[in-house]
Image (cartoon, rainbow, N blue to C red):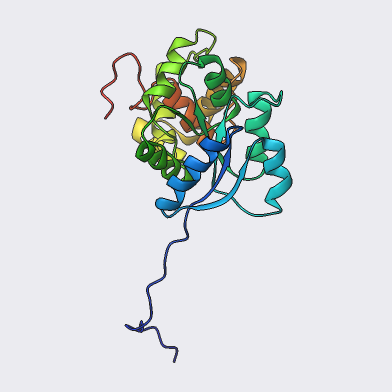
Amino acid sequence: MSETSTDPNKPAPTTAPVRVAIVDDHESVRLGIQAACQNEGFEVVLTAAGVQELVENLSGREVDVVVLDLSLGDGSTVTENVKRVQATGSAVLVHSIADRVASVREALAAGAAGVIPKSSATKTVMAAVATVARGDVLNNLEWASAIDADRDFAKAQLGRREREILHLYASGLPLKLAAQQLGIGYSTAREYLDRIRVKYVEVGRPAPTKVDLLRRAVEDGILPGLDADGGDGR
């Protein structure tokens, strides 16, 4: 018979530290974020002055979050940088000057998990790193302000039922349970979800995965916490 009891003298298993990489073309910024991450107990896998350097030097090492500066001086584009980082399997946390609205919007549209201004307190930046590492969308005022201030960031025109389905599904309910809660059939709920995805494609903000749909729902104020028009943030 196998033993299932726990040895009281054996150390409890520890959670693996958050693995971080930092991309910024200013050495002082890289060193500052690196020190803050290490103080927080995060593992800094790599620091780099550009995304090309990051990709070339990862050598198969896994990273949970890449803290990415938008204003790299190597001629690369925001979308290109975000996509290349995502291709490594890492989430992207944008670290940028808050008034660069167009670049922030471009990064979010490319799939960045959130944006944190360079003016933020160190503890705020570290909390954002931890949030993104968990796979959560970063809800903050900078994201809301960037979207609200950019008139080109088109919201998908969703109907009432579509908004209700998106709210429930993106909040974490399986589609079958979301349909039951609304008193509609599963096939009808699936049709609504398909329409929602089509509408987001039409405005240039595709949402092929559930995580993408969560981002769109947060961006458009369908889920609370980022409603720039005065939502209660519950």
Q: Residue at x 26, y 30 (%)?
A: 234
Residue 127, located in which quarter of the rendered image? top left
Q: Position of residue 12 (x, y in %)?
A: 37, 73
Residue 172 in sight:
no
Q: Position of residue 166 (x, y in %)?
A: 44, 28
Q: Nearer the viewer, residue 201 or 9?
A: 9
Q: Position of residue 212 (x, y in %)?
A: 53, 32
User: Can you say whether 157 is above or below 225 in the image?
Assistant: above
Q: Position of residue 53 (x, y in %)?
A: 70, 41
Residue 171, located in which quarter of the rendered image? top left
Left or right for 170, reference 229: right
Residue that extends furthest to the top in the rendered view of this protein = 151
Q: Residue at x 44, y 35 (%)?
A: 137
Left or right for 57, reference 1: right
User: Can you say whether 125 is above or below 140 in the image?
Assistant: below
Residue 139 in sight:
yes
Q: Nearer the viewer, residue 130 or 165?
A: 130
Left or right for 57, reference 113: right
Q: Nearer the viewer, residue 170 or 39?
A: 39
Residue that extends furthest to the bottom in the rendered view of this protein = 1
Residue 117, located in which quarter of the rendered image? top left
Give the quadrant of the N terminus: bottom left
Q: How many marks?
A: 0
